[in-house]
Image: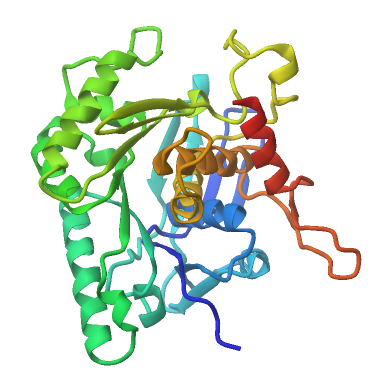
Amino acid sequence: MAQPSLEVVTLGMFIIDDIYYPTPRAPVTDITGGAGSFAVLGARLMRGSGSTVGWNVHTGSDFPETIFKEIQSWGTRCNFIHTPERLTTRGLNIYGQNERRDFEYATGKMRIDQTTLTTEQLGAKVFHLICSPQRCIDLVKGIIERRVQMVEEGKLPEQAKGRPIFIWEPVPALCIPSEFANSLEAIKHVDVLSPNIEELQSLIGTRRIIHTSGVPIMQELDDECHELLDAGSSGTLQAVIVRLGELGARVVTSDRETSIGAYYRPYTDMKITEEKRTGENKVVDPTGAGNAFLGGCAIGLLTEKPSMNMTTFERAAVYGSVAASFAVEQIGMPVLRPASGLTGDEEQWNGESVGERLKSYLNLS
C-alpha cells in the first residue's frame, strides 16, 4: 500500500543536547533536541501518527542508538543521512542563576535546505522554517522552484505546483534592529510569522511591547503585529502568532486579535477558577516548547476548519498549545506508549491521550 502524502516537513535541525545545570545538580547528556526535532514532535502529537510528518536527520559517527530507536518509535518519515566522517551536531546548554540559559554548538552544524529534501518531502502541504530573513526567502523560492521542477519531470502530482503553507520562526540571534528591514522583506514570502515576544521586542528595538514586569503590553503588541501584517500584505503573510511562553500565544490577523492560553497556565491568572485549572502543573523544562507549538500549529492549519468561534489560525494555536504542553513535562522528549490493537487502547504520551488533553483544553477555554 502506498504511503499517504506528507503533510508537514520541517527544515529545522536535529541536535543532540547536553545540559549543564548549576551545582550540585548533575548534567544530562545525549538528549534528543533541536528545533526540527521538537517541531516534528508537535506535529506527530497532534496528527496521532507519524506517517504524514517528514524531516531529515544527519547522523554522525557518534549517533546514539538510544536516540535512533526513540525516533524510529515515532513512526515519522525520517530521512536519516549518515555522515560517518563527522560527529553528530551537538549543543551545549549551560544554565546559570535564575534559569538563564547559554547555548553554543559543540560540533559543526549540518543545515537543511531545499536540496536536502527528498522528492516526497518537497510535496508537503506545510513547511516549518527556522532561519534568518534572507535564508527564509531563499528557502521559500528554492522549495517552490524544485516543486515545479519535480512536477514537470513527473515525480510529483500536478497539484504540487500549487503553493504550500510556510511557517517562519525567526532565528533568535538575528532578531535585531539591523535585520528589521530584511525581516519585512521575508514576511512577504511566508504565510505565518511566529517569533516569541522577546524576539519580537529585540527585532523592533525601542518600541516597548513588554512591560518592565515582563507582561506583554497587548495594545502595543497588537499594533506592532498589524504593522507587520500591513508590510507583508503585498505578499502572502496572513497571520502573526506571537508566542508568549507560559501566557500562551497572541494570534493576530488583519481583522482580529485573540489570546490563546497555554495548557499549563500560571496560577497567577485569576481568571481561571480552581475548577477550571488543568490540575497539577507538570512543567519541568520549556526547551523546545516553541518549536513543538509550531509543529502542532502546522497540523491545526490542515485539520480544523473555523469552528467554535475560532478562526483557522486560532484553532491552529490551540493545537500548538496542547503540543507544547507535552514538550515541557520533561527534559528531552515525552515517552510514547503505542496504541494496542489487542486491547483497543489508543496511544499515550507521558501516560496521557493527546485527544483527551485537547478536549480538556477546549473545555478550559
Query: Picture coordinates of residue 342 (x, y %)?
Result: 90, 70
Query: Picture coordinates of residue 181 (x, y %)?
Result: 8, 38
The figure's colour scheme reads rainbow
In screen coordinates, is 111 left or right of 247? left
Look at the image and tell me in which quarter the N terminus lies: bottom right
In screen coordinates, is 237 left or right of 127? left
* Residue depicted at 52% across the width and 50% down the height: 17
Look at the image and tell me in which quarter the C terminus lies: top right
Front position in the image: 231 or 136: 231
**Camera sees residue 170:** no
Q: How many marks?
A: 0
Front position in the image: 314 or 14: 314
In screen coordinates, is 95 left or right of 177? right
* Residue depicted at 35% across the width and 65% down the height: 110
Q: Is residue 143 above or below residue 217?
A: below
Displayed quadrant of residue 85:
bottom left
**Camera sees residue 49:** yes
Displayed quadrant of residue 197:
top left
* Residue depicted at 41% across the width and 35% down the height: 102
Front position in the image: 316 or 144: 316
Query: Picture coordinates of residue 133 (x, y %)?
Result: 18, 48
Query: Picture coordinates of residue 103 (x, y %)?
Result: 41, 41
State the residue lying farthest toward the bottom: 153
State the residue lying farthest toward the right: 343
Q: Is residue 182 above or below residue 69?
A: above
Q: Is residue 9 above or below residue 120?
A: above
